[in-house]
Image (tube, rainbow, N blue to C red):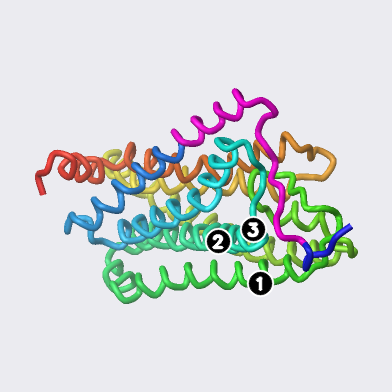
Amino acid sequence: MSNSSSITQFLLLAFADTWELQLLHFWLFLGIYLAALLGNGLIITTIACDHHLHTPMYFFLLNLSILDVGFISTTVPKSMANSLWDIRTISYSGCVAQVFLFVFLLGAEFALLTVMSYDRYVAICKPLHYGTLLGSRACVHMAAAAWGAGLLNALLHTANTFSLSLCQGNAVHQFFCEIPQILKLSCSDAALREFELLLFIVFLTFGCFVFIVVSYVQIFRSVLRIPSEQGRHKAFSTCLPHLAVVSLFISTSFFAYLKPPTISSPSLDLVMAVLYSVVPPALNPLIYSLRNQQLKDAVWKLMSGSF
């Protein structure tokens, strides 16, 4: 038996028992990680270099790509290193840092996706007021608020998690330090802590979710009133990438954290963790670039050296 003060390291869940499968996991994660870095890096560089993309929508997309790079870099490199070197350990301080960064970037990304839905709402429902409501100062303030919300969320959750006494060993049944798995190591009754944690998450995410849903209800009502089919298609095309990213992010993360305990299993928890922590940062650049001709043209200009 041990408590949190005597724990110097945690044992993460291995993806496989054999070296060959661990090597396969390494190469698979390496491919996904490089794709995420390349895609998000191209978006960040393109938006920064092309002055035609210095608009609120692309400013928020730039922030989203930065968050995605940090988000996937928090968990995947350590998991790849463990698979390559056939180890499972992460230091106590490394686990604390991983929890903090993961929750910070997760919360900030969800808050930013909420801000981006407001950007689409103003652009389609109040186009004449777009420059007034989403000026450069307002955009910076909203982006800072999203990052700040993630920071506050991370501070509260990290302090709450690691203030518990841990005496149920040091094996975390996940490929990274995930809060629900760490709470299972508590030797005290963590039910109240888990309830408070869940209540806070539900309150924050439900508020953002309702805001996004209301925004898109108003957007769809406005789009359907556009007389020309070409105008409706153009309006929808600016919303579909964001809506696809939001749907992917919310569906995977909500199911991972709010699924009933009766259907929980180590393998399902592992799959869901990969789906909400690894897949979205790699797919987001592809989703945005496929549906946005202006961004595709700008990326092509960057790659061909036409700037």
Kind of residue at disc 1: Leu
Mark 2 or mark 3, whichever is nearer to me: 3
Look at 79% across and 64% down and name the residue there: 6
Q: Nearer the viewer, residue 1 or 236?
A: 1
Report which residue position mark 1 lands on: 156
The numbered mark, 2 or 3, whose residue comes first in the sequence reads 3
Q: Secondary structure at mark 2?
A: helix
The numbered mark, 1 or 3, whose residue comes first in the sequence reads 3
Kind of residue at disc 2: Leu
Q: Nearer the viewer, residue 47 or 166?
A: 166
Look at 42% across and 44% down and name the residue there: 284
Distance Cα–Cα, label 1 vs label 3: 16 Å
Locate residue 168, reporting x and y percent: 86, 55
Distance Cα–Cα, label 2 vs label 1: 12 Å
Q: Is residue 50 left or right of residue 73?
A: left
Report which residue position mark 3 lands on: 95
Distance Cα–Cα, label 2 vs label 3: 10 Å
Whether residues under marks 2 and 3 lie with C-beta atoms below 8 angstroms apart, the answer is no
Look at 39% across and 75% down and name the residue there: 141
